[in-house]
Amino acid sequence: MSFTLHGVGVGGGIAIGHAHLVSHETLDVLYFVLPSFLVPQEVERFDQAIAATRAEMESLRASIPASAPAELSAFLDLHLMILGDSTLSEAPKRMIEEQRCNAEWALKQQMEALIAQFESFDDAYLRERRHDVVQVVERVMKSLLGHPGQSPFEGGKAKENSILVAHDLSPADMILFKQNQFAAFITDVGGTTSHTAILARSLSIPSVVALHNARQLINEHDQIIVDGSQGVVIVNPDRAILDEYRLRQEQWELERQKLKRLKTAKATTLDGTHIELMANIELAEDIDQVKAHGAEGIGLFRSEFLFMNRDDLPSEDEQFEAYRKVAKAMKGLPVTVRTLDLGADKQPRFAVQTSDNPALGLRAIRLCLAEPQMFLTQLRAILRASHYGAIQILVPMLTSLGELNQTLALVERAKQSLKEEGIPFDEAIKLGGMIEVPAAALTVKSLAKKLDFLSIGTNDLIQYTLAIDRTDEAVAKLYDPLHPAVLKLVAATIHTGRMLGIPVAVCGEMAGDASLTRLLLGFGLREFSMHPAHLLAVKQQILKTNLPTAESLAQKVLKAWEPEKILALVAKLNEA
Ligand code: PEP
Ligand code: MG
């Protein structure tokens, strides 16, 4: 019987293959009472399972291939940390001793207690970590049940067109994606911020998460179509659907191959206007991807990721090394280091804030100004790294001139301290501001006069203009880059920057959406910064763009109010 499932697409492309089910039975454990003389042995068995799981994870971490995404070792560290939590590694032993129950049962009870703790967090990212707890416990269970290290790839190498169907997949399992050819994977759980989703994106494998009960509905060897772009899974498709998707798959592949040829092409419009295409990165390790897609520099280095998944603040030297590594690897190309944008959905472990409205709270530059010592440490590290490449500083979430003035004063202080210590840095280092709050967009002229460049953070500009929490799925449908208010703020910011003769970039997701490339060009944008994976598709749009036509249609878009009219004009712009 053919049926269709809908989830969240997290990796683009289409895959057609046969289901390979990943077992999730390890957590269905039985309860039994042990005779007292067996209790010490049971505790010992539990200890051994924990030790074996730790050894297995450590060996996985040591064998991460160089080509694996940088997040992988961070995820394994997180799993090791969960394994070391006393709720999982110690409390079950007390349960075994006190209740004389079997180790599997004790572990399962403790897992549920830990999951309940994670579920009570307000923060969506932290709530999602309950899946990591389950993944870790599954590993220990496998060890207790006598088949440790079992992976989704049991029984040797996977077939090339296998589609992994899992309740959930652990990041450790994902390492094997690099060594086994899988066509796609689909999972019951996971959201757009789950680790599985983050990894899927960086691996560029078609994948769909949040399918709820795919694992129950799909049988081993069922034929499946996975459409990672639409978030659709078709099980046992009929001939006509299969033919249609084969065609779409070929077209997608052809497109990708064509795009690869654009890597070294200059991004110029039909009249020869050069457009700068830059990359967004989270970690120094992302540089390989930046180079693979031919970016002309880093338009956004989200430095806060250096501060996450750890219990302490990174020292000045550690930060300096990270920034220097990127600067040197980019060999003179611009590297825009954004100062800390912690807060809201990016809470570091060392200072978990509780706030009813974290996106409107002590976030980004507000937090930095409230913690000047932490900010000065970062500024000194960035300045020191500027001696080794073309680094520039970008300040997130500016809202008022007062904040900018305070920031400038702290930059001066950091420079002064380095001078006094005789430490070299680029004295002419450029300082830019992110325009991502409507207040900043509306007063951009006053800010721009004191800045060297602007970068529009459309992700937040949309969030704050439309009053839509970007992490709240309940209002996700209302998150609209084409809302006339958003378009007017973006266009006006670009216009002001150009009038004042300072560069303006867009570094939010709008920059990487090829269906908006011409509209932004029409508004006068000449610099785009995006995830490297989107760069070639955007370049392709640029190469086919007639600027005067784009400019005149973009003006019409700005005069329209009705959503249908705006959509029709953008479609016309993309066909022109
Ligand atoms: C943005 O807000 O558009 C942006 C680029 O910053 P972030 O997504 O990191 O908030
Ligand atoms: Mg932002």
Image (cartoon, rainbow, N blue to C red):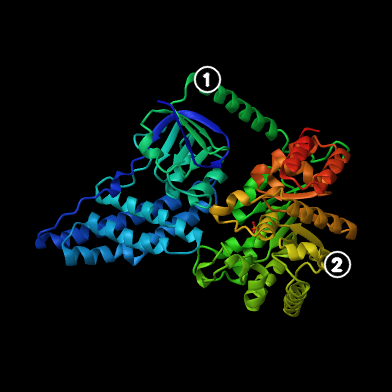
Q: Which residue is mark 2?
A: 449
**Label 1 CA crowd tier, 10 Å (few <14, some 14–19, many 20+):** few
| Quarter-of-image position of residue 537 | top right
Residue at 70% x, 57% y: name it: 457
How far across and how far down the image is residue 474, in percent? 54, 53
Per the image, label 1 sits on a secondary structure element best described as helix
Q: Which is in the foreground here, disc 2 or disc 1?
A: 1
Q: Which residue is mark 1?
A: 240
Per the image, label 2 sits on a secondary structure element best described as loop
| Quarter-of-image position of residue 396 | bottom right
How far across and how far down the image is residue 55, in percent? 35, 55
Amino acid bearing label 2 = Lys
Residue at 66% x, 55% y: name it: 459
Residue 435 shows in the view: yes
Quadrant in which the N terminus appears: top left
| Quarter-of-image position of residue 431 | bottom right
**Label 2 CA crowd tier, 10 Å (few <14, some 14–19, many 20+):** few
The residue sitting at the top extreme is 239
Left or right: 283 with respect to 505? left
Task: Give the camera-side residue of 446 and 474.
Answer: 474
